[in-house]
């Protein structure tokens, strides 16, 4: 059963979407050479405290995690794809960094991610990886419409990814969002169009394509959390929290 939220509830979700968007935009500006992942996490933590929000990550302890996450920001660098546990690493120019951030504010969750190249000046392969993720996200959001089916979102993401020559991992992907970070349904990053539950107004989804350059397989780092590409290839990840409406999809975490 996929929860549906009233128009009033969707209005109540807007502040958390804006907060997540603004914090990610600020973190992106701070992610420069010489800054450590722990400093980025500390900045995110400070903003959470100031806003009276709660981290969705700090106590997060699913079956696949070795222990509670303990930080408020996922920082995945280079061959780290997802769930990057912040540690005492100092960023250098050229690092490919994904930031994933989810909080609760006034009882509602928003979840969003972006990928950047530290210092700008990305290589052509990093540019292609990031651009493909962003294009896949736009394609997935474009299918997040009343009357479509869940598989239409998955298929759109998968098609963009495969057309660019990337293999798709369907073990970790998007999800419903509401009072908690992970709600029904799960939204794999590839699938069959026209399949799955019908999309209806008031459903709220985190849509999150992620890609690795030359593999679809990950392993868990010895920190117990960070998922890395098995072949050492680099990874990108982007995400928005999106509401199905009567018309155009509403992106709660838009950074514009
Ligand atoms: Mg996320």
Image: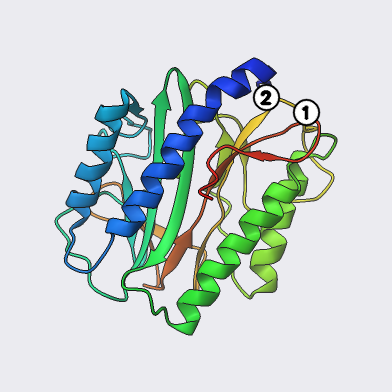
The residue at the point 23 percent across, 44 percent down is: 43
**Taking 24 as reference, is 91 left or right?**
left
Image: 53 above or below 154: above
Image: 166 above or below 207: below
The image quadrant of residue 134 is bottom right
* Nearest the eye: 213 or 202: 202
Residue 232 spot, x, y in % from top left: 36, 72
Image: 55 above or below 221: above
Considering the image in quadrants, where does the N terminus appear? top right
Image: 223 above or below 69: below
Label 1 crowd bin: few (<14), some (14–19), many (20+), radius 10 Å: many
Mark 1 vs 2: CB contact within 8 A: yes
The residue at the point 62 percent across, 47 percent down is: 188
Residue 200 is tagged as 1
**Taking 2 as reference, is 68 left or right?**
left
Residue 2 is tagged as 2
């Amino acid at each position: 059963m996929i929860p549906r939220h009233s128009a009033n509830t969707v209005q109540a979700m807007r502040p958390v979407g804006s907060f997540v968007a603004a914090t990610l935009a600020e973190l992106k500006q701070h992610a420069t050479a010489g800054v450590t992942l722990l400093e980025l996490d500390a900045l995110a933590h400070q903003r959470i405290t100031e806003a009276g929000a709660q981290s969705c990550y700090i106590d997060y302890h699913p079956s696949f995690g070795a222990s509670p996450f303990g930080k408020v920001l996922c920082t995945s660098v280079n061959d780290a794809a997802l769930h990057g546990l912040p540690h005492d690493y100092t960023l250098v120019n050229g690092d490919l960094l994904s930031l994933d951030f989810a909080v609760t504010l006034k009882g509602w969750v928003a979840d969003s991610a972006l990928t950047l190249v530290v210092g700008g000046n990305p290589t052509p392969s990093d540019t292609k990886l990031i651009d493909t993720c962003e294009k896949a996200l736009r394609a997935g959001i474009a299918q997040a419409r009343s009357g479509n089916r869940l598989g239409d979102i998955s298929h759109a993401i998968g098609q963009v990814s495969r057309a660019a020559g990337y293999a798709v991992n369907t073990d970790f992907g998007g999800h419903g969002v509401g009072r908690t970070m992970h709600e029904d349904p799960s939204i794999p990053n590839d699938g069959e169009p026209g399949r799955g539950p019908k999309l209806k107004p008031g459903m709220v989804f985190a849509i999150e394509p992620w890609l690795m350059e030359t593999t679809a397989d990950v392993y868990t780092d010895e920190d117990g959390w960070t998922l890395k590409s098995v072949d050492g290839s680099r990874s990108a990840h982007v995400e928005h929290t999106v509401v199905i409406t009567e018309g155009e999809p509403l992106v709660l975490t838009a950074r514009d």
